[in-house]
Image (spheres, grey):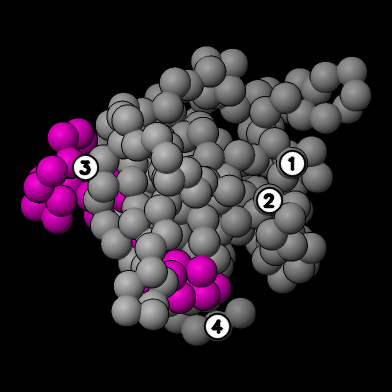
Amino acid sequence: SGSEDSPDDDQGFVFVKELPAETLDGSTSFSSFLVNSETTPNWPGEPLVVWYRQGSLWAMQEACPHARISLHTADIEDFRPHACMQSRQSTWANGAVPRESDLQALAGPCIVCPAHMYVFDCGNGACLTNELTQSARVYAVKTKRLEELGAERVQVLISRDPRQQDESQSRVAGAGEYCQTGKALKVSKDGGNKIQLALVKLGLERKFGFE
C-alpha cells in the first residue's frame, strides 16, 4: 500500500484533504488530486499529485523530472502481481509481457508522462525507461478515519519532506542483472519498455474506446 492508517503521531505530516471513506475505499479506478499553494494553502512544499484507489494513496512531485511537464494527467496502472492485471494477456502490447521478476520489483503503480512517455514507479519514484533520468520525489501518505454524522470520512496527511531514496533503487538495471535467487534487483530496461508500451496501449483504449 502507498499509505497507512496512523492516527497517533502526525509530526512531520501536513493535513491536505478530506475524502468520504466510500470515495477512497470504493474506487476501482484511479483518481487523483493536486496539492499545491492554491489547493492547499497550508502545504509548505513543492506541488504534488496524489493518486488513490481502493484505500491506498501515492504522492509524487507534480513536475516530471525529465522536462518539468505536469504529471497530473498521466495514465496510471498497477502492474504488481497482487493487482492481477499482468495476468491478462490483453494488457500487454503485442504480447510483450515483462518477466515476472520485473513485475515483482515494482514498488507501486506506474505512471507514464503525457509529454515524452517516461515511466515512473509511484512507490519509489524510479524512472523505468531512462537510466539517466533522475527519480521523482515521492512522499509518505497517512490517513486518519473519522465518524461524522454517521458517515466515515478520511483525512489525508502527507509528509513535509520526500522519502529518502536509496540510490541503488533509483535507476533501472541492465538486462540480466539478477541476484543469486534469480529475482531482479530492479526493473530491467526490457521490463520498463514493456510496461511503457502497456501504459500507452491502455491509455489509448480508454481515450478512444477500442481494444
Residue 22's spot in the image, x, y percent?
Answer: 45, 75
Residue 24 part of the magenta-drawn span: yes
Give the residue number, with chain letter if any, for mark 1.
104
Residue 15 located left or right of residue 93: left
Sequence-first disc among 3 and 2? 3
CA gap between label 3 and label 2 equals 27 Å
Which of label 1 and label 4 is nearer to you? 1
Q: Residue at x 38, y 69 (%)?
A: 147
Magenta stretch: give its range: 20-49
Residue 85 located left or right of residue 155: right
Q: Amino acid at mark 1?
A: Gln
Sequence-first disc among 1 and 2? 2
CB under 8 Å between callouts 1 and 2?
yes
Give the residue number, with chain letter if any, for mark 4.
210
- Would you call the spot at circle 4 few (<14 residues within 10 Å), some (14-19), or many (20 or more)? few
CB under 8 Å between callouts 3 and 2?
no
Give the residue number, with chain letter if any, for mark 2.
80
- Would you call the spot at circle 2 few (<14 residues within 10 Å), some (14-19), or many (20 or more)? some
Instruction: Residue 108: name its quadrant.
Output: top right
Give the residue number, with chain letter if any, for mark 3.
47
Q: Amino acid at mark 4?
A: Phe
Residue 166 visible from this viewpoint: yes
Residue 206's spot in the image, x, y percent?
Answer: 48, 76
